[in-house]
Amino acid sequence: MLTAFRALLGIAGATLAPSTLSLIRNMFEDDQQRTVAIGSWVTSFSIGAAIGPLVGGALLESALSHPWEWTLSRAVSASSLWANDSRRWPPRDR
């Protein structure tokens, strides 16, 4: 079951980058605002790519008896919360 959830997380991650960039493109009509938004987007992904493995490794080391199950269950829980909260973020008129 955890392997299936990990596969689902991989699919969600693969669709995240193109879909968020498309949202940014459609939400910001002004070129200056779009440039700032894309810069923030790139910075967020870069920081996540740099810090993600470190945080994941720390979480994996801290879980003693079932490290993979513990780590993946946290990732599924966090992804579910973020997916639920994302319904409120984009403006309704776009």
Image: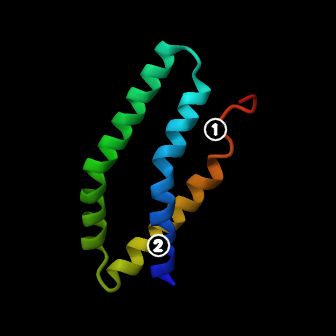
Please name the colour scheme applied to the rendered image.
rainbow
Image quarter where the C terminus lies is top right
SS type, badge 2 = helix
x and y percent of residue 12 in the render? 51, 59
- Residue at position x 44%, y 65% in the image: 10
Number of dots carrying numbers: 2
**Residue type at numbered disc 1:** Trp
Quarter of the view holding residue 26:
top right
Label disc, if present, on residue 89 of the rendered structure: 1
Label disc, if present, on residue 7 of the rendered structure: 2
x and y percent of residue 44 in the render? 37, 39
In 3D space, how far apart are the residues under numbered discs 2 and 1 (Cα atoms)?
Answer: 26 Å
**Residue type at numbered disc 2:** Ala
Q: Is residue 80 left or right of residue 57?
A: right
x and y percent of residue 9 in the render? 48, 65
- Residue at position x 63%, y 49% in the image: 85
x and y percent of residue 73 in the render? 47, 73
Label disc, if present, on residue 62 of the rendered structure: none
Q: Which of pointers 2 and 1 indicates the residue nearer the eye? A: 2
| Residue 29 to residue 84: above or below | above
| Residue 31 to residue 70: above or below | above
